[in-house]
Image (cartoon, rainbow, N blue to C red):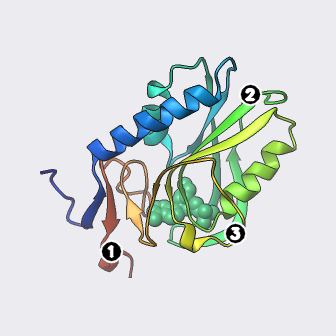
Amino acid sequence: MEEIHQDVEYVMLTAKQIAKRIKAVAKQLDKLYQGRKPVVVCILKGSVVFFSDLIRQMKTPLTIDFMAVSSYGNGTKSTGELTVKKDLSTDIQGRDVLIVEDIIDSGNTLYKLKKLLNARLPNSVNIVTLLDKPERREVPMEPEYTCFTIEDEFVVGYGLDYAEEYRNLPYVGVLKRSVYE
Ligand code: IMP
Ligand code: MG
């Protein structure tokens, strides 16, 4: 049994479940990018744990880059505004871009990010997300690859935060409502 943080209501996905699923998704991505060299983009900060596990399961030659965007304040609701806090250092024109995201909620962040990156004329842009909450979608945004589709619950851990905390938990857990209400 994993020890559970006192602010976590229950563990939704164990470290073991996550690792198993990432291995399978990495295999699919290797197939997709066969003969190409994608630039795999980590969306900071939430994706950093997922990203580092995912790229180490991928066998295809790749390069990495980082981007920091936000459409969230310190709360649990999307404001819909996209701010680029840190841009790519790679010229993506003609490249195959794989965006690695932690969770898709309203879809606002990725909808705008995809638009922004497409304007730089990459060969392709695909999205892989660890988690997807399709019930919450406000804009049409379908990731090409989803590790886990989850219910509308606010989750933390495995990179995901609430007010910058809990990113280092090795599992994905549902945050107790008392913490943010
Ligand atoms: P969207 O623009 O509403 O799709 O928001 C995506 C971003 O919101 C993610 O990258 C997360 O940073 C944050 N987010 C959405 N839901 C959760 C959650 O349940 N836990 C932690 N962060 C979340
Ligand atoms: Mg995020």
Residue shown at 81% from the left, 51% from the top? 115
Residue shown at 36% from the left, 54% from the top? 157
In the rendered structure, find residue 179 and report the number of the disc placed on it: 1
Can you see residue 22?
Answer: yes
Specify the amino acid type for callout 2.
Thr
Could you tell me which secondary element the residue under label 3 belongs to?
Answer: strand
- The relative height of residue 55 versus residue 81 in the rendered view (above or below) is above
- The relative height of residue 82 versus residue 138 in the rendered view (above or below) is above
Q: Number of labelled discs?
A: 3
Q: Is mark 3 within 8 Å of ligand 1?
A: yes
Q: Which residue is denoted by mark 3 in the rendering?
A: 80
Specify the amino acid type for callout 1.
Val
In the rendered structure, find residue 90 and report the number of the disc placed on it: 2
Could you tell me which secondary element the residue under label 1 belongs to?
Answer: helix
- As drawn, is 98 to the left or to the right of 16? right
Front-most of residues 174 and 147 = 147
Q: Choose top left, top right, bottom left or bottom right for residue 128.
A: top right
Q: Earlier in the sequence, mark 3 or mark 2?
A: 3
Q: Is mark 1 within 8 Å of ligand 1?
A: no
Could you tell me which secondary element the residue under label 2 belongs to?
Answer: loop
